[in-house]
Amino acid sequence: WLGTGANSNWSTSGNWSSASGGGACTGAPGTSSNVIFDTNGNNVCTVDSTVTVASLTLSTSTTGGYTSTVTMASSVTLSGDMIMNRGTLNTSASNYGISVGGNWTNSGGTFTANASTVTLTGSGSLTIKSSGSSFANFQINGTGTWTLQDALVVSTLTVSAAGTLDTKSGSNWPITVSGDWMNNSGTFTAEVG
């Protein structure tokens, strides 16, 4: 992300580069793109159209790096990881959803959930780290096992039949649910801390 195009929209090709701080590309990222927001494009971004990419990283560093805001004006689908080290991801007042096929790793960024839905769709062994950012509607719809790396705070939580939510052996991270917890024949593993 450069953010130096005619506007701050995701779909504007002049806002993107294939290398950090490089020249502008001729198009926005595609389905196989690993999208990175870093210090060389520390400008706001508006996700103005439906996005499907491999992964999304807000800042490659927890010190410095990207400190601006990505605001969703459409939904985002990731086949891989959501990584937040700094900066803000805001689902906006329209509550656009995010689908994540990999890990959710927040090591210092800000996730503004509003009333959005985050859906985890992956398989295998995966992790969830929220760093204090809460979720509104949180759904585990994949076949994977998601292991908490810190406390989880949600308004509603749904675990599908094929998915597993694990509080992590040796840690037993707490889960706070202010609304409904729907376990649709999924597996919840409450470890001993």
Image: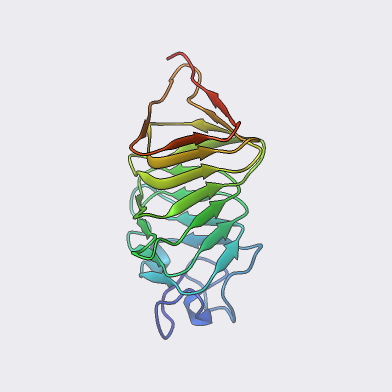
The one of 108 and 124 positioned closer to us in this rendering: 124
In this picture, residue 23 sits left or right of residue 129: right
Q: Position of residue 145 (x, y in %)?
A: 60, 32
Q: Is residue 78 visible?
A: yes
Q: Is residue 119 above or below residue 15?
A: above
Q: What quarter of the picture does the C terminus occupy? A: top left
In this picture, residue 135 sits left or right of residue 124: left
Q: Position of residue 146 (x, y in %)?
A: 55, 34
Q: Is residue 94 above or below residue 115?
A: below
Q: Is residue 130 visible?
A: no
Question: Furthest residue to the bottom?
Answer: 6
The one of 186 and 153 positioned closer to us in this rendering: 186
Q: Position of residue 69 (x, y in %)?
A: 34, 63
The one of 16 and 104 positioned closer to us in this rendering: 104
The way the protein has been coloured in the rendering is rainbow
Tally of marks: 0
